[in-house]
Amino acid sequence: MNVHDSERLSGLLESAGYARAGAGEEADVVVLNTCAVRENADNKLYGNLGHLAPRKAAHPGMQIAVGGCLAQKDKGEIVRRAPWVDVVFGTHNLGSLPALLERARHNAEAEVEILDSLEVFPSTLPTRRESAYAAWVSVSVGCNNTCTFCIVPALRGKEKDRRPGDILAEVEALVAEGVLEVTLLGQNVNAYGSEFGDRYAFGKLLRACGEIDGLERVRFTSPHPRDFTDDVIAAMAETPNVMPSLHMPLQSGSDDVLRRMRRSYRQERYLDIVRKVRSAMPEAAITTDIIVGFPGETDEDFEQTLHVVREARFSSAFTFQYSKRPGTPAADMDGQIPKRVVQERYERLIALQEDVSWSENKAQVGRVVDVLVAEGEGRKDGETRRLSGRAPDNRLVHFAPGDETPRPGDLVRVELTYAAPHHLVSDAPVRGLRRTRAGDAWEARQAGPSVPASRSVGLGMPSLGVPAPLPAVTSACAVD
């Protein structure tokens, strides 16, 4: 969702007359779009701002803006700690960024604008899509849950749902531009419809996406087990373009810990959903999020988490050491776990999940799958002369392209020949290549003078140097 917000910010700036900084070009405006889920986000923000301070001091005219969840949380504290920041804006007013930059430039002072409620639904804002073949589509923003470890509801607000017609219209427009795959986004995506009183709205939305001609892959993230109804499983299984992949956060396998987290489901409920999904879609790959070291977690509680990992057979898991977030109930709970204990449990969890992931991937060897060729997925592709992409179940596949090189957005049929814990390899001859409208769109984007080559939204520092004097049309770089 943060990456998609960065696409919105890039689109806003381009619509306001800014031009994206190209490779090796210096940016006049740097936008840091922030997260606040873990403490590391705070450290990264202020560390990055510290690195930018001497650059800006040496080059007047450069502007720095900070937005997103940390901006919503810290508000004016950002300018107090980093007085060289020009603009601070929150999660509810992304659309204000161009005006705030202009106001800060005109007034020669910092502008801080943090709203308490959503000003404009982000999907009405212009977007600079990072991919020609795959797109994010928000179905809702905000969250009505009260998980004790999570700061997001306080920063994103209560859930706001888009009307189904607006969502489908956006998807249809994307498909008309060449997009083959969409991922439906929401803080609690399968609670979609709660605002207008239809608890079956998400399953209906998945089925409606199945009626869109030219849309070949539909994914969604992230659902909450509490709201995972049987009709959603049926919609996934019965809608051909809804992919057999599911990312469903577990957080903990212990009923006692889940209760303290206010997660409103228990271990058996979670495993029952996994069983139903696997029964309806035996080929489905299930991934998850797990927190280690939540306050009060005992050795037995942690063993229950390991039990769920063994039972659920996740293809992969995002694992986190509990991070105390000021302003959340969990931050003040008794029983904070010592770092050395959390680290030991974390390492045991990682080792188990690595074994499970590798075993699950080994079971894929010999299968023939259709891979949507991606751009920039494989870090070693240049060395191995392979290309990369995603199978229907969202597993990462590296493959030898053969005589005819596919483009990002094209589809190849390959046989899986090797498995590692985090990826699969096909070194067998490609069995089929389908050149697609998405590949055409990617190719046109490379050639078109009006559209810069696609670059992924980075997660680290932008490349900065001496900016040129501010021209009539300035350049901008947005990162999260």
Image (cartoon, grey):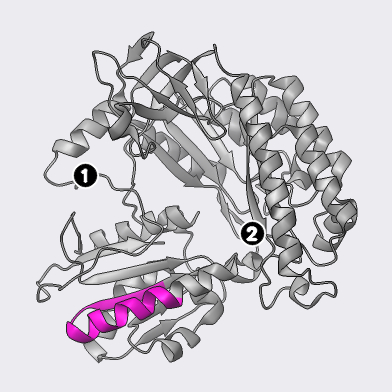
Q: Amino acid at mark 1?
A: Ala
Label 1 sits on residue: 453
| Left or right relative to 416: residue 37 | right
Relative height, residue 406 to residue 245 (above, below): above
| Residue 197 seen from this side | no
For the point 65% across and 26% down, which residue is it? 360
Along the viewing direction, whichever of 67 and 175 lies nearer the viewer: 67
Return the mark for residue 130: none
Specify whether residue 163 is painted magenta.
Answer: no
> Disc 1 on helix, strand or loop?
loop
Residue 59 magenta: yes
Tell me the residue at 50%/54% (across/down): 1
Label 2: which secondary element? loop
Question: Which dot, 2 or 1, sits closer to the camera?
Answer: 1
The first of marks 2 and 1 along the sequence is 2
Q: Residue at x 54, y 35 (%)?
A: 422
> Which residue is tagged 2?
159
- Measuring from the top left, give residue 12's x and y in whole percent: 31, 61
Magenta stretch in the rendered image? 46-66
